[in-house]
Structure formats: C-alpha cells, structure tokens
Image: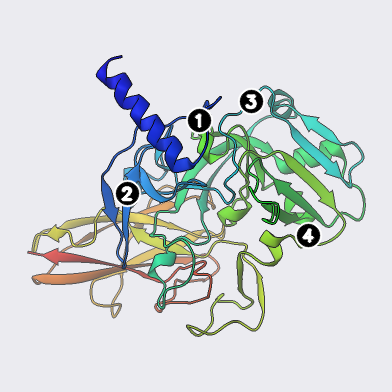
Amino acid sequence: MNQQDQNNKIQRRQFLQTMGIAAAGLAFTPLRSQADSETLGFDNGTRELIAYPQKRPLMLVTARPPHLETPFAAFKEGVLTPNDAFFVRYHLPNFPLSIDADQHRLNVTGLVNKPLSLSLKELKGLGNPVEVIAVNQCAGNSRGFAAPRVFGAQLGNGSMGNARWTGIPLKTVLEQAGVKAGAKQVTVRGLDHPVLPATPEFVKALDIDLALSGEPLIAWAMNGKDLPFLNGYPIKLIVPGYFGTYWIKHLSEIEVIDHSFEGFFMKNAYQVPDNDCLCVIAGVAPEKTRSITQLKIRSFITNLSEGQTVPLENTVALQGIAFDSGKGISTVEFSDDGGRQWQATSLGEDLGKYSFREWRATWKPQSKGKVALQVRARNRAGEEQPATNMWNPGGYARNTIETLAVIVV
C-alpha cells in the first residue's frame, strides 16, 4: 500500500468515526479532510473546514447529520454557486450513504386518480425538461449574528447558494396522477429518517395551488450536472422563492391530502412571528406564529472581506449579489458613511427573478482608517432591507442591511 492509499484509508476511518456509522457496505466515503479552519464574525465562530465527497472544504457545522456551510469567499466566483461549494443541510441522522438511481422510485399517492411509482427514466419521460435559476437559502442563514443570540446552529452568511436547476415541474407529475377534487395540500419527503422512534419524520407540505402552479420543480441536475449526492441525488424538490426547508433531498414520496398537514416540521418547527417583519422585540416570545415560507430581500458585498485593507484615494471595485423571493431586484446601493448617503450601483445580467442578481460599483476612499461599507437592496414591489436588526426566537430570515468593515491605508 502506497502512502496516498494509506492516507485515504486513515481519512476514511476518521470520517466513519465522525459519522458514527459502520463501514460494511459503505459506498459513500470522503475524498479528503483538512484541518484548516475559518472564523466567522461572532463569538465561538471558528469552524473546521472538511471536504466531503464531491465537495471542496466547507465549514463543518455538524457531522451527523451532515451540515456544511459555504465559506463566503466562494460567492465572488460568480453568480452561480459551484456544485462543490454548495452548502449542505440534513435534518435527520439516518440518511442514505449510497443510492442506485436506476432503482430509486418517486411514489405519488393520496387523493389522486392513479397512484404512481416513477423511475428516474420515467420521470424524465413525462415531458421536456425545464430550467430555473434559483436561490436555495437555509431559514437559519446568518443566525450567528442574532443579538441576543438564539438557540440553533450558529451560522454565518454561507448557508445559501444559487444554481441552475433542471427537471420537470411538480405540476406535470401531479397531472399525470390526476389530482382529485378536494385536494388541499401535498406532503413531500425524502430518504432521511430518524434514528429514534420518538423523533418526528421530516415531512413538509405545500398548498395545492403552489404545487400546481408550475413553479416547483423536481430536479435531477444542478448547473448542468447530476445533483451532488449531499444536495439530493438523484432528485430534489425545488421551490423557487421559498426557504430551503421545503427543498426536499432524495425526493421519494408525494402524497395529496384533503387537509392542512400538521406534522412537527410544519406545525412546531420553522415557526416565525405572524407579522410582516417576522420579528418581535428581542427576548420576547411572539403571541402567534406561522410557518416560514418565502425568502426576504437581501444583498451582500462579495469581493471584499472583513478587515481587508484598501488604498487611500484609489478607485476600489465593489461587487456583490442581491436576491429576494421572486419579485425582482430593482436597485442596489452602498454607503460608506453609516447610511447617511447612498450611492447607486449597476445591476448585472438578469438570470431570472429567483436568481442572485449581480451588482457592481466603484468607490474612492477619502480618509484613512476603518470604514464600514453597507449595502442595501430594493425590489420591484418596493420592499427594502431594514436598517436595524429584526429579531425572532428562531433566528430565522435575517435580512438586515449588511455592514463590512475595511481598513483604508
């Protein structure tokens, strides 16, 4: 055995120990791991960088189930997030380690005229493939910046990504099954399951109007390639404009029902205050909650990093991204004086209303020292990012104006 093989064997063993699973029959093994780390901008923000199969080194949040955050530097590589940099979020630790795409089936049951059990080939044969470029963002993205801090994975800004998804509309599959009168919702689930009987299954629900709208997609490709295993291979539910909790990986079951589904991950988890801002006074419990649904408008600077030095009186290029739930970005502005004055930016190519929208600007620093750059976006519905922290107990849906400190020298 050569040294490389020996290293791979050691890394595989370390991965299995981390995951807490047996080696017998394991087809899904890591390519490598790294001991490097990245530090996020809040207390206890140091994260180890780990390279799982098909992934570059990503920030490890939890090992079982896999929860990996994208280092923010990846977003300056382009509007489309590379597959190997895309974040990973599982809810339940009993997840598949290998899947035979030829054997995988999508079962459609419930209030339908014809129950279905579709292979991937049969799914692809239902019609011409369609594409949508859409942002997938974890509901808890940026939770680590909540003040006061809240319970849950302490995430930076990297639990999001933008990709070109290829598949067939959910509507096409439901029409093939024939939805009966009285249908109210569809429930969806994948192949991850709880270990303990008392743990709820991860099942989500979409209103029937949304399910039949033609917007949700059952995707088999991401940026022109098969879905990465950890992002849902072989098929994944894409719900453009909605938070990632609805984007079911390894999609296996769809059930049409005549009532509102009240499973744990719809009735108890992913709850936000039932008001327009999804917020309450910090530390106060909301009187009424509802399930989180659509993304909120956000924008970021992507080509500079916190604490980076820039030269005095030289022109500095600024660029970044903005997105919302699908209403469409109309303007992005930046400020270098605490938000007293805002300067316009130029928007890049429009890749679709659910995509990241690139923006660019130039800035000429006028004095030395620390400068807090801010960026804010507005959409075509007139919605704008708030200047102050919007707090809720789950740390969900943060969309406060972002501030990035640089040092002018």
According to the picture, the residue beneath numbered tag 3 turns out to be 101
Quadrant of image for the N terminus: top left
Check disc 4 and report its element: helix, strand or loop. loop
* Residue type highlighted by circle 4: Phe
Q: Label 2 sits on what residue type?
A: Glu
Identified by mark 3, the residue type is Ala
Res 126 quadrant in image: top right
Front residue of 343/285: it is 285
- Residue at label 2? 48
> Contact, CB < 8 Å: mark 3 with mark 2?
no
Q: Is residue 180 left or right of residue 26?
A: right
Count of numbered labels shown in the rendering? 4
Q: Which mark is residue 224?
A: 1
Check disc 2 and report its element: helix, strand or loop: strand
Residue 219: horizontal and vertical position, in percent?
62, 37
Label pair 1/4, CB-CB below 8 angstroms: no
The secondary structure type at the circle numbered 3 is loop
